[in-house]
Amino acid sequence: MTAPLRIGPYAIERLLGVGSFATVWLGYDRTLDAHVAIKVLAENWSHDLRVRERFRDEFRLLRRLEHERLVRVHAVGELPDGRPYAVLAWADRGSLRDRLAAGPIPAPTALRLLGEICAGAAVLHRHGVVHRDLTPGNILFRSADTDGPDAEQVLIADLGLAKALAAASGLTARAGTPGYMAPEQDDPGAVIDTRADVYGLGRLGLRLLSADPLGAAAPGPDPPRHAAAIRLREGVPSAIAPVLARATAHHPADRYPDAAAVHAALARANSAAPQPPSPRTAAPRPYRSRLAGAAVVAVVAVGGAGAEPGGGGSGLPAGRTYTAGPLTVALPAGWSATGATWAGQHGADGEPEPALVLSPQPRRWAADPRLPGAFVGLSAATAARTTPAGFLAERTHADCTPAPARTNRRAGVEWIVVAYRCDRGRPRIVESAGLHAGRAALVYVQVVPPADAGPDFVDTLLAGVRVR
């Protein structure tokens, strides 16, 4: 295959991939100093008007949905020979297939990654779109430069148009990838709905989390239909097995109804398991997330989630208050804040729930044990499954001694507060949680007070937390 020198205004650097219906090239925009992926309809299908139209449908759909969990479309065009092409955001960090080929992904990271994939599929399902081919090759990674050099986005690509293209071309071969396609996708007369994607998510889960990952996603018989038959990797909560068993049930009626339901079930199963602290172990960073270090176990995904302009996300002085989404906090002297989402906590719509981080240097707080700071999160999903006391019981710290829990009513919230003194990492950590009756949500605040803070520091900070 001869590489074109240019496609539209883009200089072509190399081939990224070849599929049955399209070829993808890496292009470079000299004016903007940016790389893009350019997907071109394969030459052998250019004569088929139905295939050409279905090819364009994918990009119309992506453009209509326009979501950060989906590959973005920048432009469309036609080559001189009439073949259509689309200019897409380049997934510069490769695919899940690439990463799995390089070796096993650590279990905690694999769990979080599966949640991100479910959230992306939930976006499609909310808009009435069925992907139909959720495989490691269609899960892509793109740098998220705004959140630091290690931050990245997880993207869903190729929105199930392979089946539509096959139908338009008159092909009779199965539409889907063996090992990931639902059983009903083998039946030309079957009705395919969101439960086919649920099956694909379950198979991805088995590939990521099973003790026999290659066998779990290999072509052939269905995976085990009973949770007891699923052997999970070390470090994966046992409660995950029933979720994967139900997602991969042979009959669609026995599966979860959609990706949001799978996502919620995974979150419940993961939250119900004891969370072993790992204060001195660096963890790979998933999509837009950071693992708090040195005994601070709140996991946050930092990135503007409705943050106010000038609110101090850069770490500069921010004034007396800071607002991110529904959360507003009064800032201690010398502190600023940054908007965030609460990694691992998702609402009924599959989106991460809101949070913010405040500190003298908020973007460094999670990784630097010398810095004081606080994490504030709001979760309706957590309030639906447990009480504030039950939630705090899940947030214990290794190498730390807790003081007796106390209660404190501030800003209309009845807070339960537990203070820890620690032998390693941060010397003092305060965990607090309460119910916000107006929103039926749990408000969680984790505080590392300054070394010279007085006894009222935490209570004053809690009094400054407001929820709209």
Image: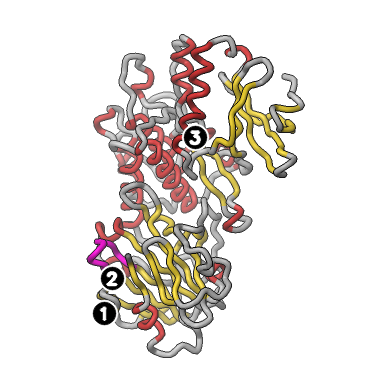
Q: Amino acid at mark 1?
A: Arg
Crowdedness of circle 3 by 10 Å Cα count: few (<14), some, many (20+)? some
Identify the secondary structure beneath mark 2. Answer: strand
Quarter holding the C terminus is: bottom left
Stretch in magenta:
434-443
| Residue nearest the viewer, comparing 403 with 46 | 46
Q: Which mark is residue 434?
A: 2
Identify the secondary structure beneath mark 3. Answer: helix
Residue sitting at the far right = 5
Identify the secondary structure beneath mark 1. Answer: strand
> CB of mark 1 within 8 Å of CB of mark 3?
no
In the visual, does 250 lie left or right of 131?
A: left
Q: Residue at x 38, y 25 (%)?
A: 221
Q: Amino acid at mark 3?
A: Arg
Could you say where residue 308 lies in the image, as x and y percent from the top left? 47, 64
- Of the residues tagged 1 and 3, which is closer to the observer? 3
Q: Residue at x 72, y 44 (%)?
A: 33
Against 138, residue 350 (above or below) is below
Which label's residue is closer to the chain start, 1 or 3? Answer: 3
Q: CA distance from mark 1 to mark 3?
A: 48 Å
| Residue nearest the viewer, comparing 419 with 90 | 90
Which quarter of the figure has residue 431?
A: bottom left
- The colour scheme is secondary structure
Instruction: Kindly identify which residue carries mark 1.
Output: 409
Q: Amino acid at mark 2?
A: Gly
The verdict on residue 297 being magenta is: no
Q: Residue at x 38, y 37 (%)?
A: 202
Instruction: Kindly identify which residue carries mark 3.
Output: 63
Which quarter of the figure has residue 205?
A: top left
Which quarter of the figure has residue 244?
A: top left
Q: Residue at x 51, y 34 (%)?
A: 157
> CB of mark 3 within 8 Å of CB of mark 2?
no
